[in-house]
Image (tube, grey):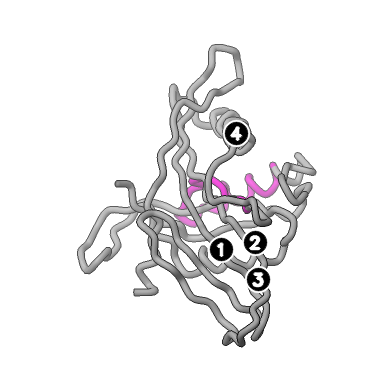
C-alpha cells in the first residue's frame, strides 16, 4: 500500500485553506518528494508532502472550483517548479463542502485531473504520468456542548479525520483522502485520458 506522509506545514496549509474558503471550494498544488520516515516505529520509504500552496485567483463555487485566471495559474505553477528547493509538484488538492461532500474523486474531479496531466505532459514527455489528488470533505458544525478551541484527528485505514474547533460552539469536521491518478495520451495530440486510480494511505506520524 502506497503511504503518504503529510508534514505539519502541509497539513496546516490544507486545513486553513479549506476553512478560509468555506462554503466555497478551495484548491492548489501539493509539493514534496520521496523520503524515509518512521511509520509505526519502522523506517519506510514513503511519499512526503512538504507544502500545500493554495491558488488565490481561482473561480470558486460551493460545488466546484476552476482556474479563473489562466495566466495567474501558469505564473503560480512556474514559480513553484522553478524555485529549486529540492521538491517537485506531485499533484493538487481541493475541497468538497456541504453535507453531500465526500472525500472521494467525482467524475468532474477526474476530468480536472486529466486536464492537469495534459499540462504537465508538455514539460515531461512520457507515455504515462501520475498525479496525486488530495480531497478534503468539509462540513460546518455548531455544537450544543462546549468544545475547547483547537483540533483533533481521527484514525481511519487510509483517510484522515480531523475536527477543528474555532471556538467553544463552532467548528468544522473534515475527512481527507488521497488518490493517485494515472493518465496516458488518448490518441489525439495534447489530450489525455485517466486510465487508473488508487487510494493511498495518508499518515500524520507526528501526531502519534
* Above/below status of 125 relative to 108: above
- Which residue is the site of mark 1? 174
Q: Secondary structure at mark 3?
A: strand
**Could you tell me if the residues under marks 2 and 3 are in contact, i.e. CB atoms within 8 Å?**
no
- Which residue is the site of mark 2? 18
Crowd band around label 3 with a 10 angstrom C-alpha radius: few (<14), some (14–19), many (20+): some
Which is more toward the observer, 29 or 93?
93
* Above/below status of 3 relative to 184: below
Q: CA distance from mark 2 to mark 3?
A: 14 Å
**Could you tell me if the residues under marks 1 and 2 are in contact, i.e. CB atoms within 8 Å?**
yes
Crowd band around label 2 with a 10 angstrom C-alpha radius: few (<14), some (14–19), many (20+): many
Q: Nearer the viewer, mark 3 or mark 4?
A: 3
Percent x, y of residue 148:
57, 87
Q: Is residue 84 within the magenta segment? A: yes
Q: Secondary structure at mark 4?
A: helix
Q: CA distance from mark 3 to mark 4?
A: 27 Å
Q: Nearer the viewer, mark 1 or mark 2?
A: 1
Percent x, y of residue 63:
72, 47
Which is more toward the observer, 89 or 95?
95
Q: CA distance from mark 1 to mark 3?
A: 10 Å
- Which residue is the site of mark 3? 141
Q: Is residue 100 visible?
A: yes
Percent x, y of residue 38:
27, 65
Which is more toward the observer, 98 or 128?
98
Range covered by the magenta-colored residues: 74-95
Mark 1 or mark 2: which comes first in sequence? 2
Amino acid at each position: 500500500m502506497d503511504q503518504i506522509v503529510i508534514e505539519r506545514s502541509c497539513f496546516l496549509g490544507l486545513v486553513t485553506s479549506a476553512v478560509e474558503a468555506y462554503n466555497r471550494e478551495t484548491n492548489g498544488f501539493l509539493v514534496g518528494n520521496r523520503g524515509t520516515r518512521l511509520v509505526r516505529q519502522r523506517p519506510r520509504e514513503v511519499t512526503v508532502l512538504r507544502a500545500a500552496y493554495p491558488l488565490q485567483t481561482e473561480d470558486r463555487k460551493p460545488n466546484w472550483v476552476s482556474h479563473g485566471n489562466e495566466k495567474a495559474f501558469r505564473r503560480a505553477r512556474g514559480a513553484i517548479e522553478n524555485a529549486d528547493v529540492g521538491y517537485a509538484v506531485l499533484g493538487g488538492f481541493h475541497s468538497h463542502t456541504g453535507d453531500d461532500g465526500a472525500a472521494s474523486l467525482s467524475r468532474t474531479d477526474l476530468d480536472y485531473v486529466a486536464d492537469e496531466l495534459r499540462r504537465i505532459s508538455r514539460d515531461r514527455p512520457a507515455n504515462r504520468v501520475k498525479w496525486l489528488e488530495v480531497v478534503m470533505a468539509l462540513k460546518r458544525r455548531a455544537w450544543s456542548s462546549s468544545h475547547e478551541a483547537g483540533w483533533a484527528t481521527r484514525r481511519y485505514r487510509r483517510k484522515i479525520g480531523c475536527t477543528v474547533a474555532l471556538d467553544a460552539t463552532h467548528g468544522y469536521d473534515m475527512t481527507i483522502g488521497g488518490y493517485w491518478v494515472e493518465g496516458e495520451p488518448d490518441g489525439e495530440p495534447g489530450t489525455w485520458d485517466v486510465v487508473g486510480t488508487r487510494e493511498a494511505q495518508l499518515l500524520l506520524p507526528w501526531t502519534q
